[in-house]
Amino acid sequence: MNPAVVRWQLISPTPDTAAAFYAKLFGWSVHQDNALGYRELRSGNDRGIDGGVWPAPPNAPSFVQLFIEVPDVDACIASAQQLGATVIVPRTALPDRDVMAVLRNPTGVTFGLSSAPTA
Amino acid sequence: MTDLRNRLGAEFVRRRRANARYSLRAFARDLRTHHSALSRILRAGSRLSDARIHSLGRALGLTPAEIAVSLLSERMRRVLAIARHPRFRADSRWIAALTGLRLDDVNVALHYLIFQRRLALVSPTLWTSEQPS
């Protein structure tokens, strides 16, 4: 099975405002019960994917990144680099045991890689 | 990323080059701060509060954008120091409590430390600094 987009992430200098906007507009719930205090936005709907909001410095532009789940983040980074991608955030093991990285594709768009927590 | 300590140090050297008799006390006076406090800051021995970064930054003639960079740099410095704490916990709220930073400021600092390869999250419980702060 090919990797799929599993999560979206909004980077925002005003994360509370951004999260509250979508919570109010769509009824999505905001959860920060994780080690980083990451604002997860859950639709409660089986369709589509959930996302979250990560803080950016004041005056930084807001943007959205898509995260693609892969079985092996390191191997995917290597393959992506061979295809012309550059690494923005190297392989990072998050406290809640997800592994992630952020790359820039050859056309300049950034995207994330993630792998599910291991036992 | 140039932090305020580096800017202050460079400015002091510049002024001393222009006037060999220019002292740290004179520099502190010009910045409207105490010379002992300034000395500690230059030796990287004390935390810089947001208010002090703003006041010293303005006294140095920094732009708001440069002051913002100085704020971020100081926050990164604090988070990096915590990664070496003997009872380190990979928990942004814990880091916020120890550093006195807001949770979002911890996470922004964390992001830039990883981006700049100064901190690596090697495992869910092990964070390593990759170069001296």
Image: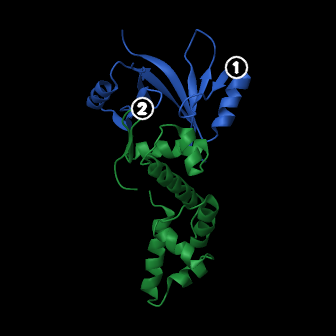
Outermost front residue: B87
Crowding around mark 1 (Cα neighbors within 10 Å: few <14, some 14 to 19, many 20+) is few
Where residue B43 sits, quadrant-wise, is bottom left
**Badge 2 is on which residue?**
B124
Q: Residue at x 66, y 33 (%)?
A: A18
Q: Residue at x 58, y 9 (%)?
A: A47
Q: Is residue B65 visible?
A: yes
In the image shown, does B102 or A48 lie closer to the viewer?
B102
Is A24 situated left or right of B98 in this image?
right
Residues tagged 1 and 2 counted as in contact (Cβ below 8 A): no
Q: Please provide percent x and percent y for residue B121.
A: 40, 37
Query: Taking A85 as reference, is A26 above or below it?
Result: above
Query: What label does residue B42 carry, if any?
Result: none
Which amino acid type corresponds to the residue marked 1 in the rendered image? Answer: Phe
Is A4 situated left or right of A42 in this image?
left
In the image shown, does A70 or B83 lie closer to the viewer?
B83
Chain of the residue under label 1: A
Query: What label does residue A26 carry, if any?
Result: 1
Specify the colour of chain A.
blue
Q: Residue at x 43, y 26 (%)?
A: A97
Where residue A21 sits, quadrant-wise, is top right
Q: Is residue A57 visible?
A: no
Q: Quadrant of the N terminus of chain A?
A: top left
Q: Please provide percent x and percent y for residue A58.
A: 60, 47
Q: Please provide percent x and percent y for residue B12.
A: 47, 77
Chain in green on the image: B
Q: CA distance from mark 1 to mark 2?
A: 33 Å
Label 2, secondary structure: give it.
loop
